[in-house]
């Protein structure tokens, strides 16, 4: 099973990716292009009832793919 840390490490390898905490304790990965003043949210990592969860900002088709590849680790936002 893929670990929460592995998924976050993958997200942070994206060009322009960085960590932010705009919602307090919830870790957010933002992506920033050279033309943007600030980054946009790409992924949010959090724990719900002790379980690590990750939500991604992506197209509906990509979301279905991620949920099928990482069942239980990627959930609807």
Image: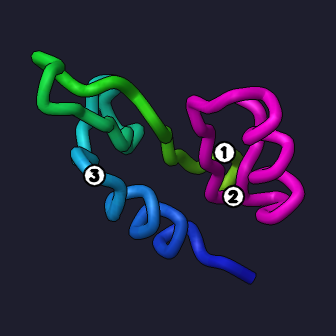
Residue 73 screen position, x and y as percent:
72, 59
| Front residue of 22 and 24 | 22
Task: State if disc 2 and disc 1 touch (CB < 8 Å).
Answer: yes
Q: Residue at x 81, y 35 (%)?
A: 61
Location of residue 64 (image quadrant):
top right
Residue at mark 2? 51
Magenta residues, start to end: 51-77
Q: Residue at x 41, y 38 (%)?
A: 26
Disc number at residue 20?
none
| Front residue of 74 and 58 | 58
Q: Secondary structure at mark 2?
A: strand
Residue 13 screen position, x and y as percent:
33, 64
Disc number at residue 15?
3
Q: Which residue appears farthest toward the top when viewing the image? A: 37
Vertical arrangement, residue 36 with respect to residue 15, above or below: above
Residue at mark 1? 48
- Quarter of the picture containing the C terminus is top right
Vertical arrangement, residue 40 with respect to residue 71, above or below: above
């Amino acid at each position: 099973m893929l670990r929460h840390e592995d998924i976050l490490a993958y997200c942070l390898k994206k060009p322009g990716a960085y960590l932010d905490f705009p919602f307090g304790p919830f870790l957010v990965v933002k992506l920033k292009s050279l033309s943007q003043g600030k980054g946009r949210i790409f992924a949010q990592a959090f724990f719900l009832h002790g379980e690590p969860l990750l939500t991604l900002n992506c197209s509906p088709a990509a979301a279905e793919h991620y949920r099928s590849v990482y069942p239980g680790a990627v959930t609807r936002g």
